[in-house]
Image (cartoon, helix red, strand yellow):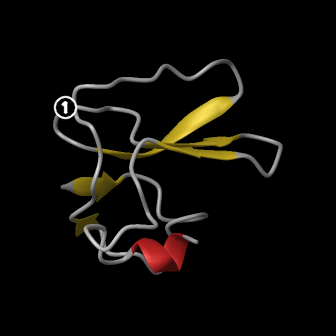
Amino acid sequence: TLKVTDPNTLFRGYPTESTVWMSHGDQVQATAGFVPLAETDTCPLAAVKHTSKPVFGLQFHPEVSHTPHGGQIL
């Protein structure tokens, strides 16, 4: 379950919690200039954005049918 922690950019209008398809065993670390947008119980950085550039990172697959609201992100 993805939990949106910042609904003001990429996740505007997206459900606060939703099912997503991802490898929960993988982890990423954000470098300077990136802030978290969403998390899961096992992945604190499921989505990030850059603070000044139009750059986003997703740890899950928005393009698959297993992520029902993924089309909103794309």
Point out residue 56 in the picture as x, y percentages from the top left corner.
Answer: 64, 47
Q: Please name the residue shown 57% across and 35% down the image.
A: 35
Q: Please name the residue shown 71% across and 27% down the image.
A: 33
**Within the image, what quadrant is residue 48 found in?**
top right
Point out residue 5 in the picture as x, y percentages from the top left corner.
Answer: 38, 52
Asked if 37 appears above or below 27 in the picture, the reply is below
Local SS, label 1: loop
The number of numbered badges drawn on the structure is: 1
Q: Residue furthest right?
A: 53
Image quarter of the C terminus: bottom right
Asked if 11 appears above or below 40 in the picture, the reply is below
Image quarter of the N terminus: bottom left
Residue type for callout 1? Thr
Return the residue nearer the eye: 33 or 64: 64
Point out residue 53 in the picture as x, y percentages from the top left corner.
Answer: 83, 44
Point out residue 37 in the picture as x, y percentages from the top left corner.
Answer: 48, 48
Is 30 left or right of 62, judged from the image as shown?
right
Task: Answer yes or no: is residue 63 visible.
Answer: yes
Is 17 left or right of 45, judged from the image as shown?
left
Return the residue nearer the eye: 66 or 45: 66
Q: Please name the residue shown 79% across and 52% down the image.
A: 54
Q: Residue furthest front?
A: 64
Q: Please name the residue shown 22% across and 35% down the image.
A: 24
Q: Which residue is mark 1?
A: 42
Asked if 30 appears above or below 34 in the picture, the reply is above
Task: Answer yes or no: is residue 12 visible.
Answer: no
Return the residue nearer the eye: 25 or 29: 25
Circle 1 crowding by C-alpha within 10 Å: few under 14, some 14–19, many from 20: few
